[in-house]
Image: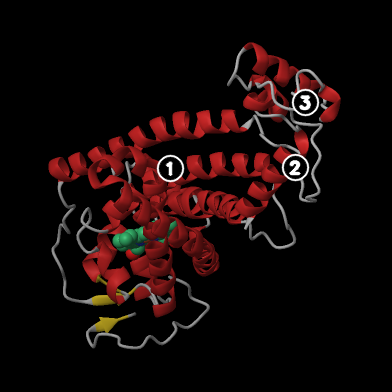
Amino acid sequence: MKALKYAAAIGAMALSLVILPSPSVAQSGGAAPAVQNQNVFNLSPSAESQVRQDANQPQNNAPVWREVNKPIGHVSTITTPEANVLIQSSGNQWSLIRNGVISVFGGWLIVLATVGVFLVYKIKGEIKLKAGRSGNEVLRFTDIERWSHWAMAYSFVTLAISGMVIMWGRDVLLPIIGGTAFGALTFALKNIHNIVGPFFTVAVIVFFVLYVRDNIPNKGDLEWFKAGGHGPAHRFNGGEKLWFWAGVTFLGLIVSVSGWILDGIVPGVEYFTRGTMQIANIIHGIAATLFIVMAMGHIYIGSIGTEGAIDGMRTGYVDENWGKEHHSLWLEDVKRGADHRGRFEETAPRVSGAPSSASNS
Ligand code: HEM
């Protein structure tokens, strides 16, 4: 819709801006050539300069473009903000940052992170449960807690893949699959990206509300970091809390706000200028790249990197030995009668489909 408005604005202004005779009329000996009788066209000074340019250097329309490039002074009947700015020249800076700094550095950062994760897996492999599996399962996440995480994970991965195709597809995919397939694919992914974005925001908000209390930092987290990511932890350890605050909360907020601006769906705001969109786009690109890099590390640790970690996300239950080795303080509390979050004052919610061997106390 906005693209149409811009196109209409540019078309209308181009017509009203300068009335130029074509070079053939200007130079032919036909009726009333413009160069000889400029009053016929009532030319503005810039149009006059174009006519002179045409006479000296046919096909050189630099004066028109100099005029068009001016940020002010054009007239349009269209009332949207900036409709009288035919070409917004700071768009050049935006394009240099987007297609230079972000795409080059961001692209290499993602390549490095991918190689890094691959090397860690090759060298270190899966972190095994030292005591093996006990066979006793302990409730760790309720259905709603799991589903809010999965909603966030699925929407995030969809946004990450579609976003990367929008950002780097032209460099990486286009030469391989060709223009027709790339055009169709990118068109589809761009629309998917625009629609899934707001769902991700909702998933992040639900996740935040459900998990924030167990992510409040405490002294033990520092000890956990000092011990190199080991040692006793309550429900969530220092690393998870860092990911919760720096990743989900901070970067989630930044990509969401900038994304809603780019989607043009911020409640109460009808119109964003090109400058606002360009700043939003730069912030969105940087934050999303960092988010993707962090998420790669997180997804690795939470899946193939750590034996037993994914169980909690899949079924809601973890092996008791996994609890002992990764969240010993939490497990102790649960065994002493706390609910599945390690809280004593509330009773644990009932969970459908609980395995019969499950124990929550
Ligand atoms: C397919 C992708 C993902 C997988 C396999 C995965 C897996 C996991 C696992 C196994 C845990 C550990 C739970 C525990 O402590 O028992 C976890 C925690 C967590 N995940 Fe994911 N995750 C994925 C995607 C995401 C994404 C995209 C985000 C954020 C955008 C995210 C945010 C978190 C947070 C913040 C925690 C820590 C819980 C907390 O501190 O509240 N996860 N994830």
Tag 1 residue: 289
Q: Which sits in the foreground, 293 or 125?
A: 293
Residue 31 versus residue 281 in the image, above or below: above
Percent position (x, y) of residue 165? Answer: 36, 48
* C-alpha span from label 3 to label 1: 61 Å
Tag 3 residue: 32
* C-alpha span from label 3 to label 2: 37 Å
Residue drawn at (14%, 61%) of the image: 131
Percent position (x, y) of residue 198? Answer: 54, 63
Ligand 1 occupies quarter: bottom left
Sequence-wise, the earlier of marks 1 and 2 is 2
Label disc, if present, on residue 134 of the rendered structure: none
Q: Are marks 3 and 1 in contact (CB under 8 Å)?
A: no
Whether residue 122 sits left or right of residue 337 in the image: it is: left
Label disc, if present, on residue 82 of the rendered structure: 2
User: Comparing marks 3 and 2, which lies closer to the viewer?
Assistant: 3
Q: Which sits in the foreground, 20 or 192?
A: 20
* C-alpha span from label 1 to label 2: 31 Å
